Image (spheres, grey):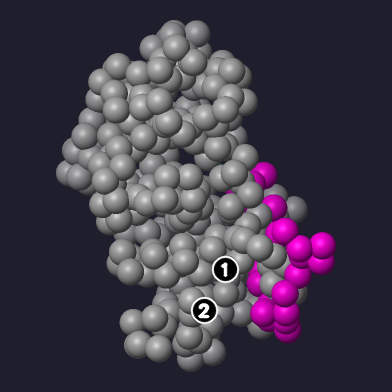
Amino acid sequence: MSDEMVWRRKDLLGIADLSAQEILMLLDTAESFVEVAERPIKKVPTLRGRTVINLFFENSTRTRSSFELAEKRLSADSLNFSGSSSALSKGESLIDTARNLEAMSPDLVVIRHQHPGVPHLLSKRLESGIINAGDGAHEHPTQALLDAFTIRRHKGRIEGLKVTIIGDIEHSRVVRSNIHLLTKLGAEVTVAGPRTMMPEAIDKMGVAVAYDLATALHDADVVMMLRVQLERHQKTLFPSTKEYFDLFGLTPRRLQMAKDDAIVMHPGPMNRGVEISSAVADGQRSVILDQVANGVAVRMAVLYLLMSSRSGGTEVRP
Ligand code: CP
């Protein structure tokens, strides 16, 4: 097997750092883990004896459960740490907390934190491999990987597709990771939303920008809806949820502006009646629950490849 087929990174901090070849290696490896979920006994011995700490300082339903299941299905030992019930409330610093946990010899640390750059900081201070499970409004690399995996499974490719991402672009880590990934793999990306939630110079990331749904949805192969991230807003950015839905909510009528076979995605959590109607969220074009299911296989691939680099690089299975 050629040298290019060996994963060499200690950490997964973001999609911005990855080459197209590394992204494809992650997606291809995830394909080989899909069938584990279809077995009566959903477990393989791949990471037996390895330890993963899940360090969550922000709430999560999908990412946290998905990492936990991925670790269990790979037979790793996992320790789940919640910031809110820890000694941080007694004044211990983040770095001291992380170094104390590392003293228990984990191999990998999965971290979600409300501040951008925390996974990068831990990567410099810890020997363990670090996986970014979402850092503020910066990146959410495993979400973008599972999104790409889902698109590829439904459309057979990423290159040449028109992907439209609609919502609170300014405050979304999902959109940033998706833009990096989708443009590296040759998709044509359009972002759309209210001007008050559109970062300046977003077009410098190689995307088209639209401020109305008719322009954004025209000819789209993939429509990705984003939640309005109220918890990250410093001030009021839109008059009411009704007005937001009237202008940017995805309804069956509006979805008709996309291609007939367009798929609808959402990273969750969804706010029905704000960015998406229930008729679309639960409709035939929705692949939202496929995204969740695929998240487990994608996270198994991330854990497997990062662990393989700790063992000096393991050849990736075809
Ligand atoms: N998509 C996502 O990150 O969801 P959670 O916040 O539930 O993990």
Q: Which residues are magenta?
A: 37-65
Pick whichever, 174 or 54, lies toward us: 174
| The N terminus - image quarter | bottom left
Q: Name the residue: 69% across, 65% down.
A: 36
Residue 300: quadrant of the picture: bottom right
Q: Are marks 2 and 1 in contact (CB under 8 Å)?
A: yes
The image shows residue 262 at horizontal and vertical percentages of 42, 31
Is residue 254 visible from the viewing direction of this image? yes
The CB of the residue at mark 2 lies under 8 Å from ligand 1: no
| Chain-order first, disc 2 or disc 1 | 1
Q: Magenta stretch containing residue 171, yes or no?
A: no
Is residue 55 shown left or right of residue 161? Answer: right
Residue 147 makes an appearance in the image: no
Crowding at dot 1, Cα within 10 Å, few <14 / some 14-19 / many 20+, comes out as some
* Residue linked to disc 1: 32
Whether residue 165 is situated above or below residue 54 in the rendered picture: above
Observer-nearest of 202 and 182? 182
How busy is the neighbourhood of tag 2: few (under 14 within 10 Å), some, or many (20 plus)?
few
- Element at label 1: helix
Side of 75 where 170 appears, left or right: left
Between the residue at mark 2 and the residue at mark 1, the CA separation in whole angstroms equals 8 Å
| Residue 244, horizontal then vertical, whole percent | 44, 14
Question: Which residue is denoted by mark 2 in the rendering?
Answer: 317
x, y percent for residue 20:
31, 64
Q: Residue at x 53, y 56 (%)?
A: 133
Identify the amino acid type marked 2.
Arg
The residue positioned 35% from the left and 87% from the top of the image is 2
Query: Residue 44's image quarter?
Result: bottom right
Which labelled disc corresponds to residue 156?
none
Compare residues 240 and 163 and report the one nearer the observer.
163
Query: What amino acid type is highlighted by mark number 1?
Result: Ser
